[in-house]
Image (tube, rainbow, N blue to C red):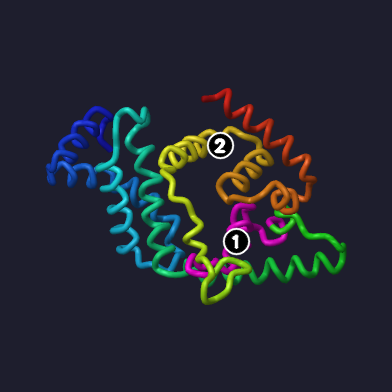
Amino acid sequence: MLEHEETLKYIKLAQSGDENAKTVLLEHNSALIKSIIRRYRTSGIEYDDLYQLGCVGFLKAIKNFDEKYGVHFSTYAVPMITGELKRFMRDDGYIKVSRIVKKQAMIIKKISDEYRQKTGESPTIEYLAKELNLDTQDIVFALDSSKMPISLDAKCAGESKEKGQLLIDKIIEVDNSEDVIDKFILKKSIKLLLPREKQIILLRYFRDKTQSEVAELLGISQVQVSRLEAKVIEKLASKF
């Protein structure tokens, strides 16, 4: 990759319309784009298409980047590339789940049902991970993949089919670019956390789980989740 000052020079040239500068930036950041699209290889989209989408997100990052953000260009580009991939998968229909993940979800459901019948309680993420010899993150991903997404074109609950308001009409459009950047910086910091602390932050802020859902997944009380979350946030705040 290019040095920071060289990157800024080429970004300014690209923003002024220099196509060659865009090409240079793409070539030197190809590894970055590939490292991001690697996460979506099981989405059912061809690799070349994923790469093209990644490049589109990267070019948008070039167009909108400003030194005043106070972050390295790569830090800004990552959520832009990821956002472009997720946007395509959302607009192109339901996100495609690989056969492997679907199979994992079915096995998890079977083990969970058997566990509930024996104990009367839901199994924890750690228990399922140990039973299947998987990472806890893989268990959470498989469980989420089995949930049917709600269409934004669907009617709101309680609304009539003729005059009901669509879900998309209730969504307020906001500029969350700063929030995305903050999440990316946070993701780097959580590597320093303890395993249980890391799980809570990943589930709460990257999987959008409620404290109650996290408590159920980890097999602890909601009060414990609340206390641990507050402790972790305080710890992370001291590092910024």
Q: Quadrant of the N terminus?
A: top left
160 over 21 or under it: above or below: below
Q: Quadrant of residue 114?
A: bottom right
Which residue type does callout 1 highlight? Asp
Residue at screen point 71% across, 36% down: 228
Membership of 122 in magenta stretch: no
**Horizontal and vertical percent for residue 189?**
53, 33
| Disc number for residue 144 | 1
| Disc number for residue 191 | 2
Q: Which residues are magenta?
A: 129-154
Considering every residue shown, the one lying at the far right of the view is: 119
Residue at screen point 62% across, 48% down: 203
Query: Tag 1 or tag 2, which sits nearer the N-term?
Result: 1
Residue situated in front as seen by the camera: 71 or 188: 71
- Nearer the observer: mark 2 or 1; the answer is 1
Membership of 144 in magenta stretch: yes
Considering every residue shown, the one lying at the far top of the view is: 238
**Horizontal and vertical percent for residue 182?**
47, 36
**Horizontal and vertical percent for residue 32?**
34, 45
Which residue type does callout 2 highlight? Lys
Graded by Cα atoms within 10 Å as few (under 14), some (14 to 19) or many (20 or more), the crowding at tag 2 reads: few
Residue situated in front as seen by the camera: 95 or 112: 95
129 over 109 or under it: above or below: above
Using the numbered discs, state the Cα–Cα distance from disc 2 to disc 1 in whole angstroms.
23 Å
